[in-house]
Image (spheres, helix red, strand yellow):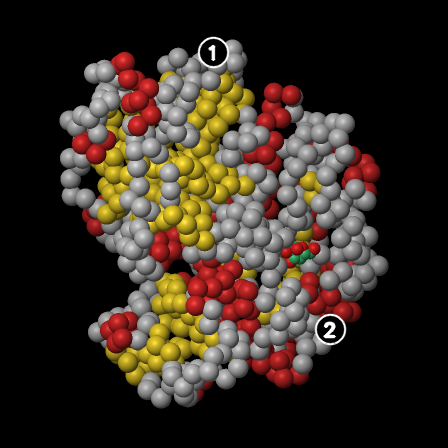
Amino acid sequence: MTAIIGRKELPGCQSTGDAGENERRKRMQINYNEQNRVFKIDTEHTSYCIGIVDEENFVGHIYYGRKLSDDNLVYLMRTAEPPFVPSKNNRDRNSFLDTFPMEYTGHGLGDFREGTLMVRTAGGHSGVSLSYISHRIYDGKEELAGLPATFGTADTCRTLELTCEDKVLGLQVILSYSIFADNDAIARSVRVVNGGKEALYLTKVLSACIDMDNEEYEMITLPGSWARERIIQTRPVLKGKQGVSSVRGESSHQEHPFMAWKRKTTTEEAGDIYAMNFVYSGNFMAQIEGDQFGSMRALMGIHPQDFCWKLEPGDAFQAPEVICVYSAEGIGGMSRTFHDLYRRHLIRGEYKDKKRPILINNWEATYFDFDTDKLLSIAREASALGIEMLVMDDGWFGCRNDDNSSLGDWQVNEAKLKGGLKYLVDEVNKLGMKFGIWLEPEMISPDSNLYREHPDWAFAIPGRTGSLSRNQYVLDLTRQEVRDCVYDMIASVLRSANIEYVKWDMNRQLSDMGSSGLPADRQGELFHRQVLAVYELQDRLTREFPHLLLENCSGGGARFDPGMLYYSPQIWCSDDTDAVERLSIQAGTAMVYPLSTMGAHVADCPNHTVGRNTPFETRGYVALAGTFGYELDVTKIPEADRAMIPAQTAMYHKYNDLVREGDYYRIAHYAENHYYDCYEVVAKDKSEALVTYVQVLNRPSHHSRRIRIPGLDLTAVYVIENAQDWPEIRQTEYRGDALQFAGINVPPLWGDFKGRLLHLVRK
Ligand code: GLA
């Protein structure tokens, strides 16, 4: 696989520090106290402490939480309590290993909690024990070969690398921790090097572990399904194992590579919360295990099921990055830390900090039934209404008139696109619009020329009937010749016309994992190699077409994860375009990801997923929380709706800088109160805020509803700038502290699914 793109080469990668040199250094310190053998990693508001103990140099986790002034914390590891350390009580070595708070675990020698690393020797033995041998602290952050990861310069970032070894195996494990001058997150990763003389088999390499006492925490995860992605779920952290995982070859609709744990008393705005998010797009596990003594172990990494990586002498395996966040400012504080980190240190490219063109996508408008004339008639109408880009979705290639054929045949269907692709794109450009296209490069239809020529290019287990899904197989991209062929096909389409946007789709999960390109003892590498191959392809694409706006997608939002955000600044959030359903989907997504990344469109009604009718205005307000666009046939919608589009597109232009760059606050969840939903985005300098209020179901009430509006300048006066949009709110001026602590009263709206925006501007 080729190395990943140099971060400095891509626009938008030079993260900015706004403070002076000293101030920046103060905000990110990593120190080693040789006397008590403690590493202390400090961000602006948090501390993370690691201790080295006993003659065998075990690496222990001491503390993660609010910033501390001192590192005198060795007592937290309880090494002066029974069963003591092995040098003092080797008869109970097992008990030590089973209770010591490990920073990164071994396996098979006495720690019976779920661990992070499993290694099998050529002789078939499984056992690992890690001891600290050295460390390195440096400015900046190194790239992770072949993987997406957060980035920073020497000015904005600092890294600790702890090298541990297992002498018996000749194995080195490098634990890496990077911190940022402008953010409280810690980016962790692990590299495993075979320094021995024989091949080793890695059967589990997770990326992060945090052992701590379980202070009756509650776990938050984001499970879902197709059209119902990332629904917020909370449960107690109990003894035993609780967690989420995917073995579907992608981060998935069903589970999400994120977990948080918080105190019961933690709210949106206050209290302790910890979180982990995996910068990876394939199989994962995220788990908290409550142990016998009231401690807990949080783990995250590549799922060990069907994973076995052969590591030859001298070779290294790089495990992907986990982002750890602690916030004392509640769930909202955690979300804002993730948002800022990803906007500044993960997302790259030309559109990183730019308003995205308002698009119209023809999927729900035409499905497969379109031709040049139909697309141009949509484009003509759309451009007159202020829409800026036409996206041609599935069905433009091969003989694809439904979803049964042609994936892999990335040649334009000229029967549909008369005059060819370039003609269509030029005509769209003449209207002053950009043009975008849909691709699904990872797949192959059995009914395709590509499959007829290369049946062995699909994953398959010899002797078994292949499991189709949406009548398609998965291409074996772990083979270089397959990657090259697919890349050449899609790149030549993109070179053939002025295509400025790609929707990169992936519409099935991975099964039948057998490759004719790898020997028997490497078949266990396939799931991970396939993810690396997708990263390599997207890396090549963004390198060759640096001005392209890439939007990832996977049957809606099955691959909405930080790994994909490294390549595309936005991801299609869900195939569910209903405004009410989207409230929950977008709230769950925004728990971790900035609004600038959420693909959100105004769609047709009755909605194609749930059959619901919602007002056109409300659909616009809800889509405003994301990248904004349309998913309908603009030539066919009711005239009254069409007439609203110019005002909606103007609204997007008015508010998008704020929505994209501001601080996000959840105010109320429809999923919890079954009545209304409310969220807010506040400008970083607190000069303005946009509150979106959606009353889902009306109830008989003469009373107005109190909502508190946080995050503002407490001493300033704010004016409702768009007071004419909600004239029933008679008072238009409020102090910041009144808005935050006392709130304002919003009157009930007549009918269901009604929405309003409140634009507050500092006087
Ligand atoms: C997936 C996407 C949709 C659409 C279809 C086309 O389901 O999520 O938006 O592109 O594929 O087949």
- Tell me if label 2 and label 1 are in contact, CB under 8 Å: no
Q: Position of residue 521 (x, y in %)?
A: 61, 20
Q: Is residue 671 visible?
A: yes
Question: In the image, what residue occupies the spot 32% across and 29% down?
Answer: 102
**In this rendering, is residue 720 above or below 572?**
below
Dividing the picture into quadrants, the one containing residue 608 is: bottom right
Q: Marks 2 and 1, how far apart in space? A: 67 Å
Dot 2 surroundings within 10 Å: few (below 14), some, or many (20 or more)? Answer: some
| Left or right: 611 in relation to 253 | right
In the image, 75 versus 332, the foreground residue is 75
The N terminus lies in quadrant = top right
The location of residue 703, given as percent across then percent down, is 38, 84
Residue in the picture at 64% in, 43% down: 509
Residue 556 is drawn in which quadrant? bottom right
In the displayed structure, would residue 152 be above or below residue 311? below
Disc 2 residue type (three-letter): Ser
Q: Amino acid at mark 1?
A: Lys
Label 1, secondary structure: give it: loop
Find disc 2 in the rendering and name its residue: 377
Residue plotted at (46% across, 72% down) = 675
Determine whether the residue tagged by mark 2 lies in a helix, strand or loop. helix
Q: Residue at x 42, y 35 (%)?
A: 207
546 lies left or right of 128:
right
Q: Which mark is residue 197?
A: 1
Nearer-the-camera pick, 693 or 486? 693
